[in-house]
Image (cartoon, helix red, strand yellow):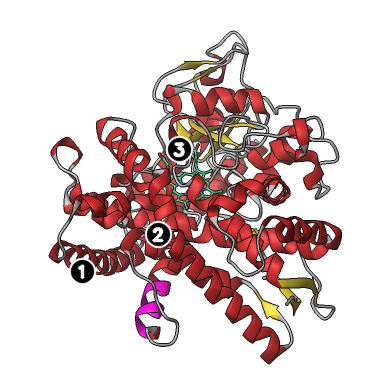
């Protein structure tokens, strides 16, 4: 009886409230809507309750396709684990979840209606990254709107993407081209060293980030477009470019709820993603098209094809390799995005660790001084003679991988049987938590300690995708094509910064290794240090 009273009270509440909400006079239409709403909510809760491991996106026993079930948290109805991952440091939250549930091999969870798996140990990570069935990527709305689905990083696995990868490995990132742009790298580095010295003299300390960002932008603009910007003489052009790159980073890095709950997109877009993307695209197109047109005027000789910039290369292609203009714009613009922040922030992390570890800094300086003559700049060929420098950069990549979740996930293109008996269904988003692997005490001893010595001698580790204990550039078919370019830039910068200056803590603002996860994981508090020039 009481229940009936309650039911009728509830009904009368909806009869009053719903017309107010929908502004309708027709009470019956509105109660139908109300019942529909309740039905959808009940169905979602039921689906979630029945789905079990992994949450609602894993309904119909999709996590039980293999002989072994894929375990994972349920999250909450409709949203799954979205609230856990939409804010803060997703790599840390996922690692904590996987470790506490002993689900490091593989863990299933739901991001709204998207089924996701994450691997937090090297063997399953290898299976996922190396498998041709995980060579696709889920495309975020921002990436689609910013033309990235025609660029290397998001193009679906197929003939077009294979052509792009071939162009990248035989032309864009070929060793002779990286070498050909050495003079540009030296120039950017020399400018940066000068700016650091000026700031120390004028201010009494140095905030390194802005110098690294300018060097990174010029470095990538030089390789991709054959252009460099003088921060004074070309201030306006530089400001426009910087604002476009920054806007793109923000849009690509923003957590977009409607990527996981598509129905939300109709009425919830707090960062005005759609509008901002459609404002940015014509600006990108105009800038890149102008640069392509300027390159077209200058003749395209064979020499340019070998040592020119990326635009020269793309314009010189013919036959099946020839790209449409819009595709060229997408490919070139993606390089600017991928190549700028990663190198700058990896160098900042490295320098922060060197400030905190003066003994390592001193040992590194000794190595560089012994191997490189004082009068000349560090050359690419010198880098081979600097094993400790390599170890320092590797150790930074281990403690602070720029893409802790390998930046962009993979997508399964069929049901995939893993060696542990689990089956990952087609259409599942697959992540590798590289941060969890590089911080796992069963994989790395004393994992929180910055200790480059661990890479000495026989303990050397291939960081270019061969050893999944430390694969900050990913692995397999979609491994980072810019890894050699990125590494040679960062190692050169660190070498020059360390041999030209001694870096110490600024006691008024001690180094803080707090992280913030955007498109990449960067220092939350930019590094400020006091430097002394070494003559
Ligand atoms: C320290 C520097 C860098 C790091 C840590 C890094 C890291 C990564 C990672 C983790 C991936 C995903 C790999 C996978 O799914 O297996 C990736 C992809 C990619 N990176 Fe890098 N990267 C760096 C520098 C660069 C540079 C300098 C460029 C170009 C100028 C670049 C261009 C790309 C592209 C185009 C992709 C997409 C590849 C594909 O999907 O086929 N990266 N990078």
Q: Tell me the mark number nearer the camera, choosing from 1 and 3.
A: 1
SS state under label 3: helix
Residue on which disc 2 sits? 336
SS state under label 2: helix
Query: Is the residue marked by circle 1 packed among few (<14), some (14-19), or many (20+) residues within 10 Å?
Result: few
SS state under label 1: helix
Residue on which disc 3 sits? 40
Residue on which disc 1 sits? 290
Residue 58: say if magenta. Answer: no
Above or below, 408 relative to 415: below
Q: Can you name the residue that lies furthest to the bottom here?
A: 202
Question: Residue 314: percent from the left, percent from the top?
Answer: 24, 50
Span of residues in magenta: 236-243
Count all numbered tags in the image, as a single digit: 3
On whether ligand 1 comes within 8 Å of the CB at mark 2, the answer is yes
Give me the C-alpha separation between circle 1 and circle 2. 16 Å
Q: Is residue 517 visible?
A: no
């Amino acid at each position: 009886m009481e229940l009936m009273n309650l039911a009728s009270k509830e009904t009368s509440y909806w009869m009053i409230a719903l017309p107010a909400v929908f502004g309708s006079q027709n009470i019956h239409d509105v109660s139908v809507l109300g019942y529909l709403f309740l039905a959808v909510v009940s169905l979602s809760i039921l689906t979630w309750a029945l789905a079990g491991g992994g949450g609602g996106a894993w309904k119909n026993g999709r996590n039980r396709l293999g002989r072994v079930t894929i375990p994972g948290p349920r999250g909450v109805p409709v949203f799954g684990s979205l609230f856990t991952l939409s804010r803060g440091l997703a790599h840390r939250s996922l690692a904590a979840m996987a470790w506490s549930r002993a689900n490091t091999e593989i863990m299933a969870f739901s991001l709204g209606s998207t089924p996701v798996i994450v691997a937090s140990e090297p063997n399953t990570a290898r299976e996922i990254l190396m498998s041709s069935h995980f060579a696709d990527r889920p495309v975020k709305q921002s990436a689609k709107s910013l033309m990235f689905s025609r660029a290397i990083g998001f193009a679906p696995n197929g003939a077009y993407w294979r052509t792009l990868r071939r162009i990248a490995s035989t032309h864009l990132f070929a060793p002779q081209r990286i070498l050909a742009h050495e003079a540009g790298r030296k120039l950017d580095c020399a400018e940066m060293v000068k700016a650091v010295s000026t700031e120390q003299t004028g201010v009494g300390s140095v905030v390194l980030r802005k110098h690294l960002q300018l060097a990174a932008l010029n470095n990538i603009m030089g390789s991709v477009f054959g252009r460099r910007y003088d921060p004074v003489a070309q201030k306006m052009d530089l400001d426009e470019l910087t604002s476009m790159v920054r806007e793109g980073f923000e849009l690509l890095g923003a957590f977009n709820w409607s990527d996981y709950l598509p129905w939300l997109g109709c009425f919830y877009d707090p960062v005005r993603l759609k509008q901002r993307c459609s404002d940015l695209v014509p600006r990108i197109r105009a800038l890149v098209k102008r640069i392509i047109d300027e390159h077209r005027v200058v003749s395209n000789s064979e020499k340019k094809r070998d040592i020119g910039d990326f635009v020269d290369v793309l314009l010189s292609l013919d036959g099946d390799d020839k790209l449409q203009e819009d595709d060229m714009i997408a490919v070139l613009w993606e390089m600017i995005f991928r190549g700028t922040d990663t190198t700058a922030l990896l160098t900042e992390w490295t320098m922060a660790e060197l400030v905190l570890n003066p003994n390592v800094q001193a040992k590194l300086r000794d190595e560089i001084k012994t191997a490189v003559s004082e009068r000349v700049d560090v050359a690419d060929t010198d880098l081979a003679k600097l094993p400790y420098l390599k170890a320092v950069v590797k150790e930074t990549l281990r403690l602070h991988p720029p893409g802790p979740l390998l930046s962009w996930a993979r997508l399964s293109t069929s049901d995939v049987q893993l060696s542990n008996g689990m089956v990952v269904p087609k259409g599942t988003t697959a992540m590798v938590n590289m941060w969890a692997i590089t911080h796992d005490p069963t994989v790395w001893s004393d994992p929180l300690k910055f200790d480059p010595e661990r890479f000495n001698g026989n303990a050397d580790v291939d960081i270019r995708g061969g050893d999944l204990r430390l694969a900050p550039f990913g692995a397999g078919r979609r491994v980072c094509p810019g890894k050699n370019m990125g590494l040679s830039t960062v190692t050169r910068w660190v070498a020059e910064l360390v041999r030209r200056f001694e870096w110490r803590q600024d006691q008024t603002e001690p180094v803080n290794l707090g992280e913030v996860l955007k498109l990449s994981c960067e220092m939350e508090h930019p590094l400020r240090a006091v430097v002394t020039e070494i003559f």
